[in-house]
Image (cartoon, rainbow, N blue to C red):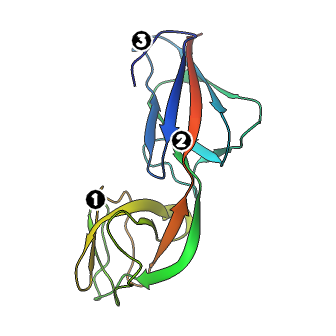
């Protein structure tokens, strides 16, 4: 996304994965105003933003204004878990940074392109399946969190959204 200058709106298509929305201009106090342009919830946060840890921004609400930004801002869209599920297996947890998850049983609903909700609580994250083998799921991006043996993996539906970001200088 180009930096079009202070006060110039930028429209960002937000997916299930963290999407870069804004980076501050070095050395200046920065602000950004974010507005959900319609449809599903959008979650705002850092590079690890997910529906379980992001600041929710509903469509039609007043824009939120973040002041004195010193790091990049990311957003992701809402997801709804489905019924297709598996658990991390084989007695070995999945460490942060992995793209491979061993599962107890491969679910036939898990295919390339499937949006996957991994883990639970504040370490729950959304990943996308790149490929599957007998009992291994490979994702398109590295996981951000550690996931214990027995952690759930659930196929889900994500809802694409659009966010308007307006940069400014204090």
Q: Which residue is mark 2?
A: 45
Q: Residue at x 32, y 67 (%)?
A: 112
**Residue 2 vertical position relative to residue 80 in the rendered view, above or below:** above
Residue under label 3: 27
User: Residue 137: which quarter of the image?
Assistant: bottom left
Q: Is residue 80 left or right of residue 72?
A: right
Helix or strand or loop: what does disc 3 sit on? loop
Q: Which residue is mark 1?
A: 97
The kind of secondary structure element at disc 1 is: loop
Lower position in the chain sequence, tag 2 or tag 3 = 3
Residue 12 position within the rendered picture, expressed as x and y whole percent measured from the top left: 50, 32
Q: Residue at x 42, y 79 (%)?
A: 109
The answer to whether the residue labelled 2 contacts the one labelled 3, judged by CB atoms less than 8 Å apart, is: no
Mark number, residue 18:
none
N-terminal of the two: label 1 or label 2?
A: 2
- Find residue 123 and report its horizontal and vertical position in percent: 48, 63
Q: Evaluate if marks 1 and 2 touch, with contact meaning CB atoms under 8 Å apart.
A: no
Q: Pointer 2: residues within 10 angstroms few (<14), some, or many (20+)?
A: many
- The x and y percentages for residue 85 are 47, 81
Kindly report the distance in space between the C-alpha atoms of the residues bearing marks 2 and 3. 21 Å
**Which residue is rendered at x = 63% and y = 45% of the image?**
55
């Amino acid at each position: 996304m180009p930096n079009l200058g202070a006060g110039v709106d930028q429209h960002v298509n937000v997916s299930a994965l963290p999407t870069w929305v804004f980076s501050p201009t070095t050395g200046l106090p920065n602000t950004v105003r974010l507005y959900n342009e319609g449809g599903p919830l959008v979650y705002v946060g850092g590079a690890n933003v997910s529906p379980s840890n992001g600041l929710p921004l509903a469509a039609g609400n007043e824009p939120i204004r973040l002041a004195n930004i010193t790091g990049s801002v990311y957003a992701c869209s809402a997801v709804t878990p489905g019924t297709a599920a598996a658990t991390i297996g084989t007695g070995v947890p999945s460490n942060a940074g992995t793209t491979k998850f061993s599962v107890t049983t491969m679910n036939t609903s898990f295919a390339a392109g499937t949006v996957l909700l991994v883990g639970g609580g504040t370490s729950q994250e959304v990943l996308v399946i790149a490929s599957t083998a007998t009992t291994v799921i490979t994702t398109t991006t590295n996981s951000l969190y550690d996931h214990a043996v027995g952690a759930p993996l659930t196929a889900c539906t994500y809802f694409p959204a659009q966010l308007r970001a307006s940069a400014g200088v204090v």
